[in-house]
Image (spheres, helix red, strand yellow):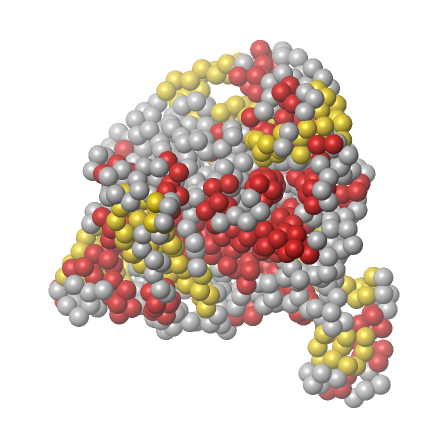
């Protein structure tokens, strides 16, 4: 079958999709977007979390055919999605796509190895939550990271000033085996604080 | 600047690229919390893990696994599977290209594909290549295998029974690979064991136990059970094999040790090692579970057979069958102590279930035996550790490696002794804590700091978290209670307990293994700046070795930009990312190669500028901030001018101090190169009515010698602590004792801690240098996994008054309904 849907603001068409294929498989193997991860493929680990019409879902549990005509945001589009949101735009417009070329052209902050105090590049290449995950040491092997980022970003959208218990509740569907979650909590707190500061500055 | 270079045109999508990291005006050397060079790639979804590889025309491989634990294979019929549209190959044992048909880390006893018999549930029997993963799965299901089931061996009694089936008849295995302590011609491992179903046995005898026992005022005994834990790394076993024009194969894979894989893969394929070119793909965690091969040989076989690239990706169900687990164990301990709280003696017997194949069992046995007394002074010991062959799932390496099981038992014993002596459990431990100079049961003297008492003091001195934190003005916040959002209690029946534990882990490969690493370091001028490239075969599995390598190069070479070359087999071995060894050994190799590069650079400088300044000839010279400087800080030359268009490159091996094998009868020998220590205090709240446990806080203190990257060190300690927490209250692969079949191969039924299960983990890092190690560092990764589990168990015992001699603890053990 053929599936038409929007991924990270760009219309996509997947052909020869077998009816049993998941959204995760189509993203990873047919559209060249392997950022969403395949840690369990049974809806337990959250590593494949994407937003489907704004709602975080395990893309391994969504049949590809179910996304016909709908909007998907993956980790690859998260930075642009967050940028549009910060600028008051809506990503549902379909105008916020990040091409892979653009993604590859992203430049890092000037201070490379330093502890998150580097000058931001002219165009914020990473969303606040992505930057915070790097700065707080929330990334080790990184396999859980894409799903956690999508889930954490969505929580901060709903709840810009979360308590620790709020963060734990929102991320309880995302398994991480490396970090013991402490640095993930730090990262979300950091992203919330930076977002708040940014909001005050505006 | 971090950049990902464009993928080479001929390489598959997802081929690892160099990552370059540098900084302007900052050093980013050792001791700083520099950020991961792969961090941006990992948060944008661009980092290519082994399951992300893609190649035009690629096929998908699928493995058919045994549905039973022990059976004779009567027949295999692949014709129907082969007839499916889209299927390119179906291979069984009979299709293997050479006479080398087994592999293994230490003993080559594991069939690539089952031959006449299957020895465990999930053993690979056949492999399929097809143009879609679902086609491959369906074709595998159409392979007809007729099994004649055999009786199963599931524990020590059934393994050693007079009529027990011998699982590996005709053994003549010798130590190979780690630990390659004994040279050729020495007694084979098989010669040390009392029964062919015993993989390895290591006794340790020291002192006069009889006399010491007679001095004891109190004696405590215990029998402990340790469940089978899974590494549960999130990135599934996966990789891509691409057949090459020269008849060889390029393999992109997630592993812990490329060269160990290579040594096992090439002979099975009938290829010289140089025709099996391995590149490390992104590794989604490992924790020991990637020390053994999984899909590597199968993918290569299918690629070479079909002439097409073949990708294999396990799903989580298959992953539970696709790697070895932590050995479940039975541990029998006896300790004695005098009335004033001094240990007199220890006797123990540790039985580790190695499952169907050897994997790392011999080394795990050696570790369990040699570390079975814990970080305590005890002069009289009678120790025996054995590893069994059974029809249970194969067990091998997992973070902590034999020391974890022992720690669970000896720490329970310490609490029992303290209780019997009416002493504080921490005070009792401190009275017996080892220190620098202590003689281990193996006779080895501990020759660097061993701050066991200080670590315990630190966790104990920490203020306790407030009681009844769930109470608020708006009623109970169930998220802070046992049962959490299940809303099972508002505080009724909830009791608190506090428990302590401390452990000892060896760092690096032991027992005489030639534990070396190789590093290639290059220095040159690029775009008007002196830059360094570090190339090793070290498997970055998440631990942050790549971060540390860049830091070492900056410190030693005074550059800011360091490029980390992808890990592959085009450079010498870096050993395994195991045994808390990589920062020590490959870090040591990078440091050493940098020093050799520095010497060459200074030689160049002397040739070019030696006559300009007398300091070139006499002073101690350093490379700092892109310049050659004297130890007094005087700048002699810019590195750009010293190097000009020269490239200075060194590849060198580096070794830590040699170790010795343990004597097979007495266990004596300087078997370990370094020890590491961590202590935990656990605070738990238990709903005694439902048997639910909430860990409120799990504080850790650890000596790391020198924190090369403090942020990463704390991440390792917190992550290791959490795996120990999982082992305490939820993680266990359940094997049916009648059939030896795995009952819970999924994340639905095998639980690992979520963010709701994991408490705050305050960490206290001590830096007492080990003068024998690079920068004084001490391996970090494993020690926190040891003491976490027994600390939680001690806290639950403290809360409930129950004996709790097994881990993990389940609700039924707490409610008396087991």
The answer to which quarter of the image holds residue A201 is bottom right
Name the one closer to the observer, A146 or B306: A146
Query: Which percent across, then down, holds residue B494?
Result: 26, 46
Which residue is rendered at x = 78% and y = 54% of the image? A122
The answer to which quarter of the image holds residue B168 is top left
Query: Is residue A187 something one can see in this rendering?
Result: no
Instruction: Using residue B232 as the reference point, say whether residue B516 is left or right of it.
Output: right
The relative height of residue B665 versus residue B298 in the rendered view (above or below) is: below
Q: Specify the quadrant that holds the N terminus of chain B.
A: bottom right
Query: Is residue A9 something one can see in this rendering?
Result: yes
Query: Which percent across, then down, holds residue B86?
Result: 67, 16
Q: Specify the quadrant that holds the C terminus of chain B.
A: top left
Instruction: Using residue B260 as the reference point, say whether residue A96 is left or right of it.
Output: right
Name the one closer to the observer, A192 or B570: A192
Name the one closer to the observer, B143 or A145: A145
Query: Which percent across, then down, holds residue B396?
Result: 44, 43
Which residue is rendered at x = 77% and y = 51% of the image? A123
Instruction: Using residue B108 as the reference point, say whether residue B221 is left or right of it.
Output: left
């Amino acid at each position: 079958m053929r599936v038409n849907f929007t991924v990270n603001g760009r219309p996509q068409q997947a052909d020869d999709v077998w009816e049993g294929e998941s959204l995760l498989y189509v993203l990873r193997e047919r559209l060249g977007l392997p950022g969403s991860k395949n840690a369990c493929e049974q809806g337990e680990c959250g590593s494949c979390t994407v937003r489907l019409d704004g709602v975080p879902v395990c893309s391994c549990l969504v049949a590809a055919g179910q996304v016909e005509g709908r909007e998907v945001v993956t980790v690859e589009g998260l930075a642009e999605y967050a940028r549009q949101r910060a600028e008051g735009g809506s990503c549902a417009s379909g105008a916020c796509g990040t091409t892979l070329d653009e993604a590859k052209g992203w430049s890092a902050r000037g201070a490379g190895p330093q502890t998150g105090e580097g000058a931001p590049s002219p165009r914020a290449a990473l969303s606040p939550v992505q930057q915070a995950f790097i700065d707080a040491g929330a990334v080790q092997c990184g396999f859980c990271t894409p799903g956690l980022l999508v889930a954490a970003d969505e929580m901060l959208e709903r709840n810009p000033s979360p308590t620790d218990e709020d963060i734990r509740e929102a991320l309880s569907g995302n398994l991480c085996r490396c970090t013991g979650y402490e640095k993930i909590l730090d990262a979300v707190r950091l992203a919330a604080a930076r977002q708040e500061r940014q909001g005050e500055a505006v | 600047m971090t950049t990902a270079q464009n993928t080479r045109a001929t390489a598959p999508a997802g081929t690892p690229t160099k990552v370059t990291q540098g900084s302007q005006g900052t050093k980013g050397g050792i001791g700083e919390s520099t950020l991961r060079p792969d961090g941006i790639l990992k948060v944008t979804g661009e980092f290519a893990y082994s399951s992300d590889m893609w190649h035009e025309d690629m096929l998908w491989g699928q493995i058919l696994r045994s549905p039973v634990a022990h059976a004779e294979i009567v027949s295999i019929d692949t014709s129907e599977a082969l007839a499916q549209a889209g299927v390119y190959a179906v291979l069984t044992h009979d299709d293997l290209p050479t006479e080398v048909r087994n592999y293994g880390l230490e003993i080559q006893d594991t069939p690539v594909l089952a031959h006449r018999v299957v020895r465990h549930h999930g053993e690979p029997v056949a492999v399929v290549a097809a143009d879609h993963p679902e086609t491959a799965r369906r074709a595998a299901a159409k392979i007809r295998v007729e099994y004649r089931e055999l009786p199963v061996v599931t524990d020590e009694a059934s393994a050693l029974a007079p009529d027990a089936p011998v699982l590996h008849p005709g053994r003549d295995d010798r130590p190979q690979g780690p630990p390659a302590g004994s040279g050729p011609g020495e007694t084979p491992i098989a010669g040390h064991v009392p029964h062919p179903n015993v993989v390895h046995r290591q006794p340790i005898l020291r002192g006069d136990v009889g006399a010491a026992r007679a001095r004891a005022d109190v004696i405590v005994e215990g029998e402990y059970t340790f469940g089978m834990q899974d590494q549960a790394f999130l990135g599934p076993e996966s990789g891509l094999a691409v057949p090459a024009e020269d008849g060889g194969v390029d393999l992109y894979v997630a592993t812990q040790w490329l060269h160990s894989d290579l040594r096992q893969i090439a002979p099975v394929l009938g290829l010289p090692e140089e025709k099996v070119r391995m590149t490390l793909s992104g590794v989604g965690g490992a924790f020991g579970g990637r020390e053994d091969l999984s899909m590597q040989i199968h993918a290569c076989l299918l690629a070479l057979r079909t002439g097409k690239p073949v990708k294999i990706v396990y799903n989580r169900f298959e992953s539970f069958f696709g790697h070895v687990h932590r050995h479940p164990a039975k541990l029998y301990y006896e300790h004695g102590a005098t009335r004033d709280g001094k240990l007199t003696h220890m006797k123990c017997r540790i039985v580790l279930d190695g499952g169907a194949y050897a994997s790392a069992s011999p080394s795990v046995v050696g570790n369990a035996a040699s570390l079975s007394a814990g970080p305590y002074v005890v002069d009289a010991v009678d120790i025996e550790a054995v590893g069994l062959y059974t029809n249970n799932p194969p067990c091998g390496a997992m973070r902590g490696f034999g020391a974890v099981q022992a720690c669970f038992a000896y720490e329970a014993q310490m609490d029992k002794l303290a209780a019997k002596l009416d002493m504080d459990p921490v005070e009792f431990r401190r009275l017996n804590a080892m220190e620098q100079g202590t003689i281990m049961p193996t006779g080895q003297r501990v020759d660097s700091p061993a701050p066991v008492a200080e670590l315990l003091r630190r966790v104990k001195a920490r203020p306790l978290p407030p009681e009844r934190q769930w109470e608020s003005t708006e009623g109970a916040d169930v998220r802070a209670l046992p049962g959490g959002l299940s809303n099972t209690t508002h505080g009724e029946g909830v009791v608190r307990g506090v428990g302590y534990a401390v452990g000892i882990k060896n760092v690096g490969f032991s027992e005489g293994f030639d534990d070396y690493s190789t590093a290639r370091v290059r220095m040159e001028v690029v775009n008007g700046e002196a830059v360094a490239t570090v190339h090793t075969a070290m498997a970055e599995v998440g631990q942050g070795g790549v971060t540390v390598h860049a830091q070492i190069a900056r410190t030693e070479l005074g550059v800011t930009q360091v490029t980390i070359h992808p890990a592959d087999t085009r450079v010498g071995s870096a050993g395994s990312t195991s045994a808390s060894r990589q920062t020590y050994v490959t870090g040591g190799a990078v440091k050493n190669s940098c020093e050799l590069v520095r010497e060459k650079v200074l030689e160049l400088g002397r040739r070019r500028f030696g006559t300009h300044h007398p300091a070139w000839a006499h002073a101690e010279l350093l490379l700092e901030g892109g310049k050659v400087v004297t130890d007094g800080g005087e700048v002699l030359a810019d590195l750009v001018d010293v190097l000009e268009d020269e490239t200075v490159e060194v590849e060198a091996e580096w070794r830590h101090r040699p170790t010795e094998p343990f004597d097979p009868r007495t266990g004596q020998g300087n078997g370990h190169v370094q020890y590491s220590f961590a202590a935990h205090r656990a605070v738990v709240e238990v709903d005694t009515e439902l048997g639910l446990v909430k860990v409120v806080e799990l504080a850790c203190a650890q000596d790391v010698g020198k924190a090369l990257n403090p942020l990463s060190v704390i991440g390792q300690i917190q992550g290791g602590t959490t795996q120990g927490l999982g082992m305490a209250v939820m993680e266990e692969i359940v094997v049916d004792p009648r059939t030896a079949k795995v009952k819970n191969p999924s994340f639905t039924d095998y639980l690992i801690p979520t963010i709701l299960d994991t408490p705050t983990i305050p960490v206290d890092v001590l830096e007492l240098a080990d003068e024998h190690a690079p920068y004084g560092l001490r391996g970090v990764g494993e020690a926190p996994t040891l003491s976490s589990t027994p600390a939680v168990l001690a806290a639950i015992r403290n809360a409930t008054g129950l004996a709790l001699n097994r881990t993990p603890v389940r609700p039924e053990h707490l409610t008396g309904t087991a």
